[in-house]
Amino acid sequence: MERILKINSAEDILPAYLNSPISRLLEYHNLDRPYETYNSAELLIGMCMDNRKHLHIPENFAYIIRSGGANLRYSEFRVSYAIAVGGVKAIALIGHNNCGMVNLMARRTQFIKGLVENAGWPKEEAEDHFYHFEPMHEIGNEVDFVASEAKNAFTIPEDSCRTYVL
Ligand SMILES: [Zn+2]
């Protein structure tokens, strides 16, 4: 199974997603579909907090939870809220290349030094903070992470978990 599909035209979207919130996300973001008016959200998007990333989607179209690496493991209540109160019918997890949550250990010195210099933390507390939270936030590999989270966290059949290039 191809793990990454480029979306350069509407024909690239898998038939299973046609006329769904997922296809509309891909069409808005990748294909410049004209914006429609939404009074309520269709979709929950989990995406990275990275400042380089910005979605081209209409207002009210989606709830968005942003966290490092599109990691929703510590956002259960917010996911439940979007489903229960927001009424969303689909969830899209969006990873990206060069994600800062890959190989966090390589940035530990910068992280600890930054907390000390930019936030005035004592060095030992900054180290403890890094080593405590790093295992929860390291995603390993961007593609593997979003694919496995989609399968595991949301109990979605494997053939429904496709990764698209946005
Ligand atoms: Zn990222």
Image (tube, rainbow, N blue to C red):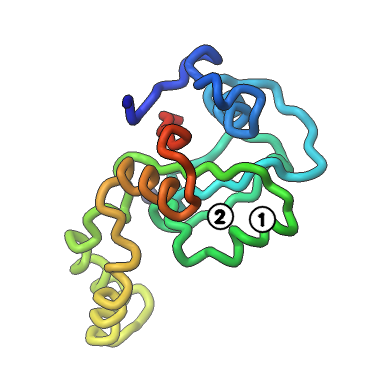
Q: Position of residue 161 (x, y in %)?
A: 44, 37
Q: Are there few (<14), some (14-19), or many (20+) residues within 10 Å of tag 1?
A: many
Where on the picture, by quarter, is residue 17?
A: top right
Helix, strand or loop under label 2: strand
Which of the 4 image quadrants contains residue 35? top right
User: As rendered, which of 104 and 21 lies closer to the eye?
Assistant: 21
Left/right of residue 28 with respect to residue 58 in the rendered view? left
Q: Quadrant of the N terminus?
A: top left
Closer to the camera: disc 1 or disc 2? 1
Q: How many numbered circles does the render carry?
A: 2
**Pointer 1 residue:** 82
Q: Is mark 2 within 8 Å of ligand 1?
A: no
Disc number placed over residue 129 in the picture, else none: none
Q: Where is residue 79 drawn, in percent x and y?
A: 59, 58
| Horizontal side of residue 28 vs 128, given as left or right | right
Residue in the picture at 64% in, 49% down: 63
Residue 50 shows in the view = no
Give the vertical position of 36 relative to 66 (above or below): above
Q: Residue at x 43, y 32 (%)?
A: 159
Image height of 105 relative to 22, above or below:
below
Q: Which residue is mark 2?
A: 65
The image shows residue 63, relative to residue 127, as above or below, that is above
Mark 1 within 8 Å of ligand 1, using the beta carbon: no
Q: Do the residues bearing badges 1 and 2 touch, measured as CB atoms within 8 Å?
A: yes
Q: Nearer the viewer, residue 103 or 147?
A: 147
> Does residue 106 appear anywhere in the picture?
yes
Residue type marked 1: Ala
Amino acid type, mark 2: Ile
Identify the mark nearer the N-term, 1 or 2: 2
